[in-house]
Amino acid sequence: MEGMKKRNILLAVSLLLLSLLRFDMFSLHEANAAPRLSGDAVYDLPLCQPGYYQEDPGDCMPAGPSESIKALAEQGFPYPLRGLAAHVPDASLSELPERVAMLGEGSTPYYASFNDAVSGGAAIGHISGGGGKYVSVTDIAYSNGRNFVRMKNGGWIEATPHWGWPKWQGLEFFSTPKHNFGFTIDNIQSFTAPSFASPSSGISYTKYDSFPIYNYAEAEGYKWYEVAPGEWIPSLKSREVLVNTHRPDGVDRDRWIAIDLENQTLAVYENSELKFATVIASGAGELYSDPGVYEVYHKIELHTMQGSYAADRSDFFYYESVPWALYYNHAQAIHGIYWPAVLGFPQSHGCINMFPGDANWLFHWTELGEYVYVFDPSGQTPMPTPTPMGTPPQPIFTPTPNSGG
């Protein structure tokens, strides 16, 4: 009996302690759930989901990650940071329609047969000139370490088959970027601030990589592009594409090719959207590419280009099978190049040079009558005197300044 009383007393004490514990836990829960006063009586709201809140959402606090996102947005950076909505077109576009071979310097003879070419027999013609010279190839043969090719005219000539033409391609877009963007023109590491004296970011770019542009700075004689928070690339080794979907004056259709002479870039627009962009090389010096609005008047898939600008013809150039040419301003054309070149710098005889894959893409997008808008944001390129549209191109042996090549 005594033992049962003790058990009852212990049970009663246990129930009392349990009740007190439950009361304390309930009180603590209520204290946490109830308004906590600090100055004015306000509720402590939960944190908002990470995002950019331009106005107070009211039911959550835009703090923590949202504050960081807001700070980035105020600096011009979207959330989340995304790459360009673009892709590189099919690599097969870079294949040349015909093989070519490079000739040596000076006048090069060619022969009626391979045996005559090897033995140095009677030549049936010569290709002269001190500049670049390339011929189309229908056959290749070798003799005692020497390379010979048969040209389209049937003649045999000593030449080096050219296999190493550039195969880099620009970008085809499926959504217009909200910001300008650029391409590098050399291998480079970005910087942590707009200065060559600032530390490197440790991020490397190879030649012709693309990057978005969110902010700008002018420093040390160059324009600088902020491509990510605290990451900068100088214009010394990059070129900018100015995204502008507004139809230029003089263009009355919603399709045009925009060529930027200052930045050495080309962009294609259709239905107020950016469709394609790449790096180019325009005319240099007195042979600059003319600014203005033009129309493509002649398309030719393969074309021989030759010419000379020096009085002694020492710079005579001869290029067979130049691919995918679009003539738009007399002898100035947009065309592919297979010979060595670094795009991003004016260097042609007035034409707009592109790597073969880009020229192929553009050639098949372009229709006769397509608008070509050539402009120079710096205003340094002289505007040409208006002249009537030219006739279909002819070989140029003694061209005047601003002729193609």
Image (cartoon, rainbow, N blue to C red):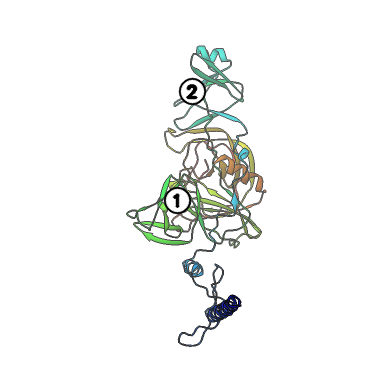
Label count reads 2
Q: Which residue sits at x=53%, y=75%? A: 61
Q: Position of residue 119 (x, y in %)?
A: 51, 11
Q: Is residue 322 above or below residue 21?
A: above
Looking at the rendered structure, the secondary structure element under dot 1 is strand
Question: What label does residue 108 carry, if any?
Answer: 2
Q: Amino acid at mark 1?
A: Ser
Q: Is residue 241 visible?
A: no
Residue labelled with disc 1: 238
| Front in this rendered view, residue 28 or 363 | 28
The residue lying at 49 percent from left, 17 percent from top is: 146
Q: Position of residue 18 (x, y in %)?
A: 57, 77
The residue carrying pointer 2 sits among few (fewer than 14), some (14 to 19) or many (20 or more) residues within 10 Å by Cα, namely some
Residue 302 quadrant: top right
Q: Earlier in the sequence, mark 1 or mark 2?
A: 2
Q: Secondary structure at mark 2?
A: strand
